[in-house]
Amino acid sequence: MSGCDTLLAELGLNMERHGELVENLGRTYREKVLSQPDRPASMAYFDSAIHELHGDRIREIFEARAAGRKMIGTFCIYVPEEIVFAAGAIPVALCGGTAWSIPYAEQTFPREICPLVKSTLGLAFSDTCPFAPLEDLAVGETTCDAKKKTWDILGGDGFHVLHLPHKKTDAARRLWLREVRAFAGRVEHLTGVRITARSLGQAARLMNRKRRLLGRLAGFQRSAAPPISGTDALVVMQVALVDEPQRFCGAVARLLEELRRRVRQGVTVARPGAKRVLLAGCPAVAGNYKVHHVIESSGALVVANESCTGSRYFEHPVDARRRTRGGLLAAIADRYFRIDCSCFTPNDERVRSVVRMARRAKADAVVQYVLQYCHTYNMEAVRIAEALQRAGLPSLTIGTDYADQDTGQIRTRVEALIEGLRS
């Protein structure tokens, strides 16, 4: 048994099931990511980071906790990472993107709920999630009904819920600011560290740097001859949710420098005549590459990604010029309240944003990716499709889960869209 395996066993994981999980994740990654031709050499760091999610990253967090730091598990990008970093804690996204774990969740939860929720819970229920034994606090939020009811079941002393208002009014903004302040208090109580204006400012500048780098990556992705695929850009985003931020920023900076060289040398991942697609809608967390892979292996290219594992994560910096703790907490709350989740109503901002992103990326079409039973994105897809039609942009809405059984059907629909664009 390797050193990491010994640690995982000590953490209480079911090692037989964990081996099955890792084998499943590795096979998916080889087939849908590593199989791409002519990938940037700098992607090796991000490939390794995905591989080490159940290895070196676990050991790193284990050692940090032994030194007194706390780990905070998150389920959504509405959790302000700046507050976590300002208290010296470690935020890690806990969302699951594999179909392998879903049967374990369905022993307790209904089948008719979001696959992301089921995959995440299934990893915990099967004793295969290495982060679960390490987390000192889990933070949920009220972005969908399935999650809200899940928190009712899982809630306890080690759980905190951020109540996100579903209207973007002044009253809702004030309510959200109170939630952010309460979260800061909870993190201070957990860590025993006073969050100061200085630590908040440092954390905000770090996160702003991370967002700028990811924004530059998105710029290469939507360029006329992209030097990186949408699938690889997705991998970088998935690593952003779990990696140590300073190290991650260094790796992205190195990738960007390589992409500049590839542009100068005329190296592109786009096939001749490849159609450009904006992918909009639900997130694709680590383990989930299905729709990206289908689109890009069908001859098109994902040139922009409007999702929580895309633009919603890195858009809008925090105003780090504020000088007081209260001012910085307000700036952080304002930044996160600008995220265009489908949970808001009315949601004209997101409808306009998708059209604007498609035009900026010079997309030939938009594919709306909707996870099964994600009712808000599924319903909002109707309005967005209508807005795209008025803008003269073809679109396709794909409703799916994490299983591969419908891959052929999705490919047929994507290929029909591409053929229609060509003709």
Image (cartoon, rainbow, N blue to C red):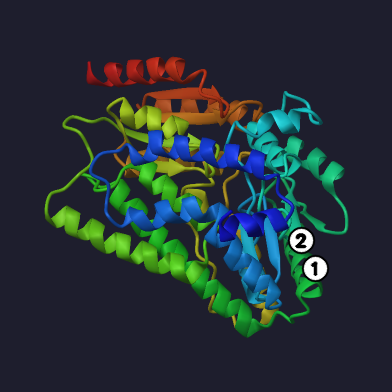
Q: Are marks 1 and 2 in contact (CB under 8 Å)?
A: yes
Q: Nearer the viewer, residue 221 or 353?
A: 221
Decide if residue 362 is on the left or right side of residue 316: left
Position of residue 239 measured from the top left corner of the image (x, y, whole percent): 48, 54
What residue is rendered at 44% in x and 23% in y? 396
Which of pointers 1 and 2 indicates the residue nearer the eye?
A: 2
| Residue closer to the observer: 354 or 156 | 156
> Amino acid under label 2?
Leu
Distance CA(mark 1)–CA(mark 2): 10 Å
Residue at the image position 50 percent from the left and 65 percent from the top: 317
Question: Is 213 drawn above or below residue 123 in the view shown?
Answer: below
**Residue 209 visible in the picture:** no
In the displayed structure image, the side of residue 308 where residue 124 appears, left or right: right
In the rendering, which numbered label is found on residue 383?
none
Task: Give how far across and how far down residue 95 sits, in percent.
Answer: 63, 45
Quarter that holds the C terminus? top left
Q: Is residue 81 above or below residue 163?
A: below
Q: Secondary structure at mark 2?
A: strand
- Earlier sequence position, callout 1 versus callout 2: 2
Callout 1: helix, strand or loop? helix
Tell me, yes or no, if residue 272 can be seen here: yes
In depth, the one of 281 and 152 nearer the eye is 152
Residue 137's tag is 2
Residue type beneath disc 1: Arg
In the image, farthest residue toward the front? 1
Residue 172: x %, y % from top left: 74, 53
Give me the disc on residue 186.
Answer: 1
In the rendered structure, the answer to whether residue 418 lies left or right of residue 94 reads left
How crowded pointer 1 is (Cα within 10 Å; few <14, some 14-19, many 20+) is rated as: some
Dot 2: few (<14), some (14–19), or many (≥20) neighbours within 10 Å? many
Residue at 64 percent across and 32 percent down: it is 115
Name the one closer to the observer, 98 or 180.
98
